[in-house]
Amino acid sequence: MPIPERLKPAFVSTRAAEPDWTEEARKRLIVALDVPDARSAEATADRLAGVCKWFKVGLELFSAAGPDVVQALASRGHSVFLDLKFHDIPNTVAGAVRSAARLGARMMTVHAAGGPAMLTAARTAIAGLHDAPELLAVTVLTSMDAAQLAAAGVQRTPAEQVSLLARMGCEAGLRGFVCSPQEVAAVRTLTGPEGVLVVPGIRPAGSDAGDQKRLATPSAALRDGASYLVVGRPITQAADPVGAADAIVAEMAAALAV
Ligand code: C5P
């Protein structure tokens, strides 16, 4: 899958004429730092820095450590994905996105379910900024199956709801989306090669699903068009996090090389 021109410095290996698939894989793995404090986050990121480049700051870590943790990770040379999934009225989300964009993260999230006016407000709030982070719209959480959606009042299947939200996001001018590996091929068809598709719900074969419902392996997600994979517990809760991350990178590299 071609990489959007703007994000190329994070991807392209300059070391060899032939792609170095392991290096490419390292640049497409995002480790979710769902840990309770900045010290654990920085220690985990530093430990994994030889294996991958990206780290996700989500609600648990941000609520505990605040904006400083984003700046601390970025200043240590890590690429930060700030996953706060904003969902509020357009004016409030525009302000939140504008504030968050100053922290040094390279990607950040809003909920597509906030609607087209909210997505447009979020996009335009950072449109003129130098080095603005990529704005991603979260479609349907990977922990939701059809029963969970129905209980929340959505009668469509997860696949139908993801397509509806991704189409709406494209119409609002976004090209970055978060979706499960089970819908990534369909979303890739909507966005084309310029889409930045970030995919959680990743589980190496045989690993524990936890609360996730719409899952696939790293290789399946990449083959279906994912730009980046988000992996949390299979790495951070492994007895050997570096070994677990290395194994995922190896699986990703093999899939990219095909
Ligand atoms: O531990 P695990 O690999 O399940 O972590 C997945 C991460 O991806 C979590 O931090 C979660 O918040 C995030 N995420 C998700 N589903 C989405 C969007 C983000 O699981 N749709």
Image (cartoon, rainbow, N blue to C red):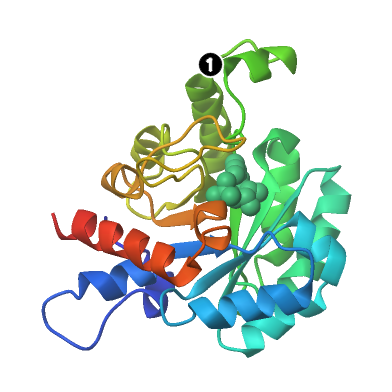
Determine the residue positioned at 65% across, 65% down: 127
Question: Does any portion of residue 137 appear in the rendered image?
Answer: no
Q: Is residue 67 left or right of residue 227?
A: right
Does 111 sit above or below residue 126?
A: above
Q: Nearer the viewer, residue 22 or 170?
A: 22
Q: Position of residue 123 (x, y in %)?
A: 67, 56
Q: Pointer 1: residues within 10 angstroms few (<14), some, or many (20+)? A: some
For the residue with label 1, is its CB less than 8 Å from the closest atom of ligand 1?
Answer: no
Residue depicted at x 40% and y 68%: 243
Q: Nearer the viewer, residue 125 or 223?
A: 223
Number of labels in the image equals 1
Which residue appears at 53% of the width and 80% of the height? 47
As helix, strand or loop, the secondary structure at mark 1 comes to loop
Q: Is residue 63 visible?
A: yes
Q: Residue furthest front?
A: 239
- Horizontal placement of 190 versus 198: left or right? left
The x, y position of residue 51, in whole percent, is 41, 76
